[in-house]
Image: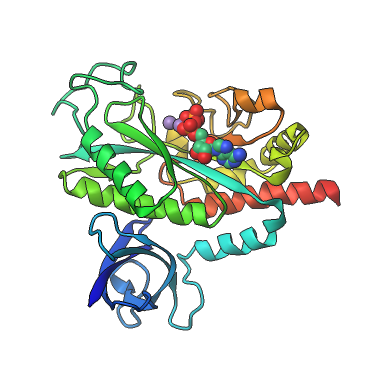
Amino acid sequence: MSYQAEYIWIDGTEPSPLVRSKTKIVATGKKPGIWGFDGSSTNQATGANSDCVLQPVFVCADPLRGEDNVLVMCEVLNVDMEPHPTNTRHACVASAERYASHEPWFGFEQEYTFLQNGRPLGWPATGFPAPQGPYYCGVGGDKMPGREIVERHTAGMLRAGLAIEGTNAEVMMGQWEFQIGILAAPECADQLWTARWLLFRVAEDFGVWATLEPKPILGDWNGAGCHTNFSTKEMRAEGGWDAIIAACEALGKNVDEHVENYGFGIEMRLTGHHETQHYSKFSYGVSDRGASVRIPWQVAKDRRGYIEDRRPNANMDPYVVSRLLVETVCGAEEGDRG
Ligand code: ADP
Ligand code: MN
Ligand code: MN
Ligand code: MN
């Protein structure tokens, strides 16, 4: 007997990579091993030297095929087993190991927009739906297109054993969110990439594309972000408030490196409107959804907990974002001690 392993990886498409996958039949009792693909078809190699290596790093049940079938998230390596230039996970693992004693935790809020025929799902073929207002967490009528897809995706996440925490309809019609966490790096990012693959795959069955475009519709329509919630052991501990403020201050000293690596097209989304701070500015505040970094009210009340970096785009790479947060915040924590 054999089972199907769906190997998933991140390609080399510019400016934002795409997710790819292909199926390997594996003999029952064997684990999904190293595999390969044609990198010249994914922007990862030249035709004359096309082989790239898939190294399995995270395996979960395949909720669509069921039975013994699995999903296999992979890192891309060169044939010499060194990380491929498009492999951002490798550096994420290194920083997670370097700062493991800080016990950094993550929760990602992945926003996305359903598209059909190049238009947000449920929108009229020309013109616009009623203005924003009723859609966020809305219910009823024809206001909330895409809910069947969201339900199928959520059920799949649970069946796969992935750490989905919740879902909600977003401010723009056709835009939705799921949250994933609370997990350490790189696992939180492994799970987010797997969850994105599952979303795209489930939406396929409905003839719909779930895009991570940060600003799918210009004008008075919210963009799509991936708010990244972050904490360290110090921030979560009794009296963690000072560490929380120190984390915000550290982020304020390293604005450009973060913003430049928080997803292509970030200046289109971080306009200072639609619940964002302008990309050229940095601010933090309790309950402030117009700030770069928000401290949730419950955290302010408890004087400990986590912060929400509101800047990352929906199309950000969670390996890069989690690495930067760890390096900036944990790096500063060590500096303070040192
Ligand atoms: P909102 O929409 O109000 O910004 P959500 O409920 O969508 O908030 O998301 C909250 C996120 O905070 C979740 O992804 C959760 O994992 C994350 N989170 C909660 N506690 C922590 C923590 N201690 N460290 C890191 N992330 C956390
Ligand atoms: Mn949210
Ligand atoms: Mn949201
Ligand atoms: Mn949020």
| Rendering coords of residue 101 (x, y %) | 72, 56
Question: Is residue 77 depicted above or below 161 in this figure?
Answer: below
Outermost residue to the right: 338
Instruction: State which quadrant residue 223 falls in.
Output: top left
Question: Is residue 65 depicted above or below 241 in this figure?
Answer: below
In the image, 262 versus 174, the foreground residue is: 174
Q: Can residue 91 be seen in this snapshot?
A: yes
Q: Is residue 66 left or right of residue 187?
A: left
Question: Is residue 329 depicted above or below 37 in this figure?
Answer: above
| Rendering coords of residue 292 (x, y %) | 58, 31
Q: Is residue 146 left or right of residue 255?
A: left
| Rendering coords of residue 299 (x, y %) | 64, 28
Q: Name the residue located 28 percent from the left edge and 65 percent from the top edge.
A: 69
Q: Name the residue located 27 percent from the left edge and 21 percent from the top edge.
A: 139
In the image, 103 versus 118, the foreground residue is: 103
Instruction: State which quadrant residue 140 falls in.
Output: top left
Count of marks overlaid on the render? 0
Q: Name the residue located 36 percent from the left edge and 74 percent from the top edge.
A: 32
Colour scheme = rainbow
| Rendering coords of residue 248 (x, y %) | 68, 35
Question: Is residue 76 depicted above or below 246 in this figure?
Answer: below
**Where's the N terminus, which quadrant?**
bottom left
Q: Name the residue located 19 percent from the left edge and 49 percent from the top edge.
A: 204
Q: Can residue 120 be seen in this snapshot?
A: no
